[in-house]
Amino acid sequence: MSVRQIARLPELIGSRRLSFIIIGLLAAYYVSLLIFSTMVHPAGVIGIAKTVPFQVLYIALFANLLACTLRRTPRWIRRCMKGTAVADDATPDRIIAFSDLSREQALDAAAKALEAEKYSLTRDGELAGGVRGRFGALGSLVSHWGMVIVLVGAFLSLNHRFVGEALVSEGDKFWGTAREYTSFNPPTSFRQNAPKVSFRVDKVEAEFWEDKLLFTKLAAQMHSPADSKGEPVVVRINEPIFSNWYTTSVRLTGYGFSPKYVLRNDMGKELESSWVNMSIFPPGSEDSFRVQMIPHRFYVKLYPDYRQKEGKPDTASMNLNNPVFHLKVASHKIVTFDGLLLPTQRADVEGYSLAFEGMKKWATVQVVKDAGYPAIFVGTLLICIGNLWRFVFFRRDIVAKPGPGGQSLFVYCRADSLSLSDRWAEAPLAAIEKALADASRNNE
């Protein structure tokens, strides 16, 4: 490779053509992932997204964008610093004839017209010009560096993101240990990836639309840290709470019930009791648990607002208005009890009895640690601000030069490529024409 080719390497890495190629490949990869995600678990898709081909593409896109931004940043800064209007050497946008005026008078009239239109003046010999939106290139500068920051955030999210879920009942505390999570990803390096978070769930509230399994409200009142006092914070299903500079979020993803069972002997003496977090919601779902004293397994269904429909157990709503349990008890595949059970009503099981004497609500809490969140947010904000700046404050250059013969002005108009239309030049051109006409009448 020659020295000249090495010198052009940054230009090649930061070229637009390479950008289009990389973005096209990423788009093809993401379309294939979108199709693949309909057939496998999301964790499998995330695993694929972290494979070497994706990593190579991400690094290539970052290098391309960084090289492009670094190469163009000095140019954008110089353009902002340049207050002199730059003429377009192509065909003039307007030829304005005048009479009874010298070249100097015509250029002075054009300069005054541009000044009245709030253009920064350039008056240099045989030239009169003006600039408006001098700092329009700042939009390109800000938006490109915003994209670099977004890619940095995406890289951090892809490689250091932690997502865990825990089932926490009302009144219980969560300390963020590995045992308390029902699942977490990545499954390894828990200490390095898991956030330091703790909270106490005080109350879980759920409301539904009519008798449908559609939440109109799912919220939990929490204290964080777990031992803190004062006013609780409210976490909703669509409104997470953030901490640690917005790198850690806590949100609700599920809801259910925790019944309290009480096991007694044939004399009615309590032998054991405990709250059991069970997946018995939505109505009809079945879950099971064991007790310590006897080898039986207890299968439970819950009808929150019990009614009979066509001779079968059903629920009139999702709320705990009239809760009834369906309990099935089995030992070595032999069913010893199978029937409906009201709260506090006892089910006899081979010399023992079991009753449900309490009910709490639980919420599935998702804990996410993502160091890329702040970077992605800030970068996206910069991209929006930069692009808005480029559209609203785009640079406009107007230059007027005497034409051949000295009885006309050649007016050149130039704007950044993101100007919405060429109509921006109509007002200053009309002002120049009017100024020349007025000057000609005054000299008659």
Image (cartoon, rainbow, N blue to C red):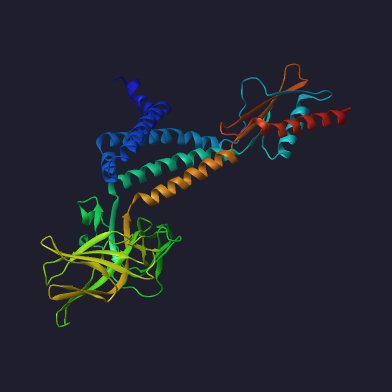
Percent position of residue 33, x then y: 32, 37
Observer able to see residue 30 = yes
Quadrant assignment, res 306: bottom left
Quadrant assignment, res 95: top right
Q: In this view, does 348 lie above or below 168?
A: below
Q: Is residue 111 above or below residue 351?
A: above
Question: Which residue is located at x 68 percent, y 24 percent?
Answer: 93
Question: Which residue is located at x 35 percent, y 25 percent?
Answer: 7
Quadrant assignment, res 222: bottom left
* Figure disc tally: 0
Question: Which residue is located at x 45 percent, y 61 percent?
Answer: 210
Residue 63 or residue 330, whichever sits in front = 330
Percent position of residue 158, x then y: 31, 45
Residue 431 or residue 360, whichever sits in front = 360
Name, please, the residue furthest toward the right. Answer: 444
Percent position of residue 351, x then y: 12, 76
Observer able to see residue 195 = no
Q: Is residue 123 left or right of residue 310?
A: right
Name, please, the residue furthest toward the top. Answer: 405
Looking at the rendered image, the quarter that the C terminus falls into is top right
Q: In this view, does 22 lie to the left or right of 294?
A: right
Percent position of residue 264, x then y: 17, 78
Residue 422 or residue 168, whichever sits in front = 168
Q: In this view, does 181 lie to the left or right of 248?
A: left
Residue 368 or residue 422, whichever sits in front = 368
Looking at the rendered image, the quarter that the N terminus falls into is top left
